[in-house]
Amino acid sequence: MKVAVVGATGMVGEVMLKVLAERNFPISELLLVASERSVGKKLSYKDKEYTIIGLEDAVAAKPNIAIFSAGGDTSLEWAPKFAEVGTTVVDNSSAWRMDPDKKLVVPEINANILTKEDKIIANPNCSTIQLVMALAPLHKKYKMKRVVVSTYQSVSGTGIKAVQQLENEIAGVQGEMAYPYPIGRNALPHCDVFMENGYTKEEMKLAREPQKILDDRSFSISATAVRIPTAGGHSESVNVEFANDFELNDIRQILNDTPGVTVQDNPDTNTYPMPIYAHDKDEVFVGRIRRDETQRNSLNMWIVADNLRKGAATNAVQIAEYLVANNLV
């Protein structure tokens, strides 16, 4: 299995390599790919040193799978070139997610829609992945009508420049700004760019992507996305109105029985999900599960996951694992 990791020097790329190694993904030949300014640099994988190559050389090598985490513009230009030579691309950017001809996949939910013909497969937004992991099994049982989600997103979701800004502010150092304002001791209700409707692009991803993943537009989602000064891990406050009523114990049981989801929900012992505990883990953690006492058939919960792992790298590697296991590459 010849595998290319495109964007290998970035934050998600580094985690991608870590996850591939941890999960012993079957690689006979590994291509580490990055922009021209990184070509020739060295990176190690499983104690072996690799030289970074450029995109043209990577296409010429015709890998079986290319996992992209190099930004939307790079994906739009280069994913089709890889696909043309027979490579299956798993893309982590927003470039292909809402393309009607491309599949948007969270393996635990909808990997079964993949075929050999799918040469560009979209990895959902990090906040979307953890949200649908909790919502999908509940929707199956109780039928969602409306979801209101407020996110508390880590600076690592913006990238290394934002992590550096936070670290500089903590250390009292003047440095380059990733955000228009300080992020330390602050909360920015501004993730991604603002759109004409007053929502940010991140908020619209949260509204649209779950409908595509679940192949169901009968429910609606309204989102407010907020950046907070945590170094890793996204949190979400979620309110769901169902068509049918539920018992809280059944909700906990359903979530407990969902692969990839861990329930942490005991107010008596102050047990609830937090980014600091989700760090470097692949599970989606759910807690603060309680009935909304102001609205019929409605539920509140708190969802936390490591945005660089299940929110990006791990989900992409799981897609690749499914492709290999089912002889789709």
Image (cartoon, rainbow, N blue to C red):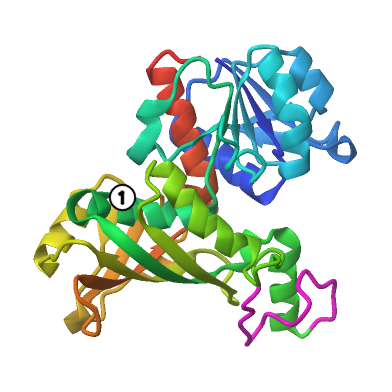
Residue placed most toward the observer, 37 or 253: 253
Position of residue 284 relative to residue 162, above or below, is above
Dot 1, crowdedness within 10 Å: few (<14), some or many (≥20)? some
Left or right, 41 with respect to 104, comes to right
Q: Nearer the viewer, residue 84 or 142?
A: 142
Could you tell me if residue 51 is visible in this image?
no
Q: Is residue 221 left or right of residue 28?
A: left
Q: Which residues are magenta?
A: 173-190
The residue shown at (45%, 68%) is: 235
Q: Nearer the viewer, residue 298 or 74?
A: 298
Element type where label 1 sits in the image: helix
Label 1 sits on residue? 136
Residue at 56%, 35% in the rendered image: 100
* Residue at x 31%, y 47% (from the top left corner): 260
On whether residue 187 falls in the magenta region, the answer is yes
Q: Main secondary structure of the magenta part?
A: loop
Question: Is 140 drawn above or below residue 262 in the view shown?
Answer: above
